Amino acid sequence: MKSKQVILITGASSGMGKHAALKLIKEGHIVYGAARRVEKMEDLTEAGGHALKLDIIKETDCRAVVDQIIKEQGHIDVLVNNAGYAIYGAIEDTSIEDARRQFDVNIFGLAQLTKMVLPHMRQQRSGKIINMSSMGGKMYTPLGAWYHATKHALEGWSDCLRLEVKQFDIDVVIIEPGGINTEFGEVMLEPLLKHSSEGPYANMTETIVRSVNDMYQNQKGSDPSVITNFIVKAIHSRKPKTRYRGGYMAKPAVFIRTFLGDRAWDRMVMSRIK
């Protein structure tokens, strides 16, 4: 492993992406943070990193980011696909347009950027692609269908990619965070209230809103450093794990979902929604 690596992190304007970027800059790596809100990445540039504007669903933005890094550094060693968000709301209440955008950001935008980076990694016969999934990619909850669908898709997509690029000495790593103290709760509640605060799913929505507010307002989630440590570990490791899972409730929730089966999981989840 090279001591100093060229790293591209999407969704670096806040939360886990920003935390990881600052940590990797401090370690001496050449870090490019990419996000729509460039003004939110001034601290990255002040720390010695680079901030690039990126709307992940725009092909021209993805191409410009990759081209600039290759022009300035000659290669990309690590791609951290961290950009993403959550649309919550009942399936019946959520428009297909909103659902399609969820997939455009969480899957197709991620895939588009990855496809542009891969030829460079193949040519150098090395690289790491780190995809930010979620414990939600291994389980499910009501009113989160489209978000869970994208994370389940990302899990399978990453597994297939890992097999395809292994021959070129490129590693593909999946990270599955649990509850992390970031803007995630605030971002997910806005569409949930917009879609399902009234109508047949209003009671369920009210319960979930209370639960989410309780977790994020009372800081019950884990610190972003938990996920940053996984990213750092994967980058430093010659043979990283295929998956890293951690953060509030990640391991117990996935264990329960995996070993109790569908009906038991359904009963447990719905027992909390009265």
Image (tube, rainbow, N blue to C red):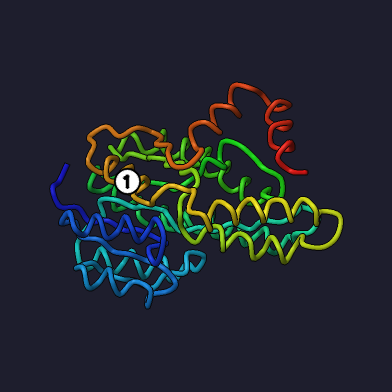
User: Does residue 175 sit above or below 113 in this rendering?
Assistant: above
Question: Which residue: 27% across, 32% down?
Answer: 239
Mark 1 crowd level (few <14, some 14–19, many ≥20, 10 Å Cα): many
Residue furthest to the bottom: 39
Name the spot of residue 268 as percent of width and height, x first.
Answer: 69, 32
Name the spot of residue 119 as percent of width and height, x first.
Answer: 33, 51
Name the spot of residue 80 as percent of width and height, x first.
Answer: 36, 52
Residue furthest to the top: 259
Q: Amino acid at mark 1?
A: Ile
The secondary structure type at the circle numbered 1 is helix
Question: Which residue: 75% across, 63% down?
Answer: 195
Choose top left, top right, bottom left or bottom right for residue 163. top left
Q: Nearer the viewer, residue 147 or 184?
A: 184
Choose top left, top right, bottom left or bottom right for residue 257. top right
Q: Nearer the viewer, residue 7 or 175?
A: 175
**Quadrant the C terminus occupies:** top right
Question: Which residue: 29% across, 59% down?
Answer: 21
**Quadrant the N terminus occupies:** top left
Q: Which residue is mark 1?
A: 231
Q: Nearer the viewer, residue 44 or 79?
A: 44
Name the spot of residue 245 as percent of width and height, x first.
Answer: 43, 37
